[in-house]
Amino acid sequence: EWNPGNVIADQVERIRAQVGDARVICGLSGGVDSSVAAALVQKAVGDQLTCVFVDHGLLRSGEAEQVEQDFVASTGVQLKVVDARERFLHALAGHTDPETKRKIIGREFIRVFEDAAREVVAEAGEHGQEVKFLVQGTLYPDVVESGGGEGAANIKSHHNVGGLPDDLQFELVEPLRTLFKDEVRAVGLELGVPESIVWRQPFPGPGLGIRIIGEVTQERLDVLRAADLIAREELTRAGLDREIWQCPVVLLADVRSVGVQGDGRTYGHPVVLRPVSSEDAMTADWTRVPYDVLATISTRITNEVPEVNRVVVDVTSKPPGTIEWE
Ligand code: XMP
């Protein structure tokens, strides 16, 4: 009979058998898969595991804290946080082309992660230990899919914790390889991973960097984070989190329109709400969010985020529109 307790007991045994007393490294993204994989390995081999979290500054409000505080508190994992926010802003400065932005973010991410991995390897070496293993949150559908190749791969270059340099050769530990997403969530909850992480909706690796249409700057990130937080709060309050696959909030940073806010005329930016319903993100329909919920989101964003004076809803299915705008 399938239950999360059995899966955990079985995987803990397998991980211990695979890893022995070697050291293990894991990259955390803040998403469900890497978090649950890390929590399983932590349960199996404890402090032999070091997790690395690259804060690229493109996460939503509260997400870095979820990893740095909640995840650590609930699992006891050893975490190395790399604050790379300045570095990413600098690398992205002046760039507006979506694919260029994606490539820059992917490239910087791998460089920062590699440097951190080298440091972890060096620190372990000082204690006479060798880092031999890398944890990956590969799920069963990923295993199946990688046989065929992803159809959408050429539409946008996807970014994930991926290839490592030749001088870092790790053997992979993939404790979620036999599991589907709902099973991963059940295992995560059983392990005590916070619900905010276990139930997190999909969020792209390049983060808010591809939800600012135009150049990414600190000010624009702050504006988008504020608007996004309001949308998430209200959708959660309305009980729509399970019905909605994800709801990107997009800042049209190079578009301005005239408005009246407070005491006078404003010339601000629009944000787009992009709520979608989907099974697998390959196709999607726009979610019919109740008008009163949309009204509350719109009122709150235009009241609380002075740079935004217009809220619009994207009513395009996928295809033809992709879920993300870039
Ligand atoms: P699109 O925009 O292609 O997105 O319809 C499909 C799904 O993939 C997510 N997405 C990404 N996820 N790295 C990721 O891990 C990426 O580079 C990336 N780009 C898009 C998107 O949020 C949606 O769930």
Image: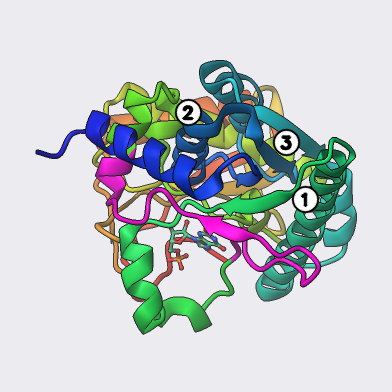
Q: Which residues are magenta?
A: 159-184
Amino acid carrying label 3: it is Asp
Please say if the residues under marks 3 and 1 sit with CB atoms less than 8 Å apart: no
Amino acid carrying label 1: it is Ala
Nearest the viewer among 85 and 95 is 85
Q: Decide: is 238 above or below 19.
A: above
Residue 43: which disc? 2
Q: Residues within 10 Å of mark 1 (few under 14, many from 20)?
A: many
Label 2 sits on a secondary structure element that is helix
Q: Is 103 within the magenta?
A: no
- Compared across the picture, whether 133 is left or right of 105 comes to left
Q: Is mark 2 within 8 Å of ligand 1?
A: no
Label 1 sits on a secondary structure element that is helix
Label 3 sits on a secondary structure element that is helix
- The Cα–Cα distance between marks 3 and 1, rounded to whole angstroms, is 30 Å
Q: Which residue is mark 3?
A: 222
Q: Quadrant of the C terminus?
A: bottom right
Q: Which residue is mark 1?
A: 117
- The Cα–Cα distance between marks 3 and 2, rounded to whole angstroms, is 37 Å
Q: Quadrant of the N terminus?
A: top left
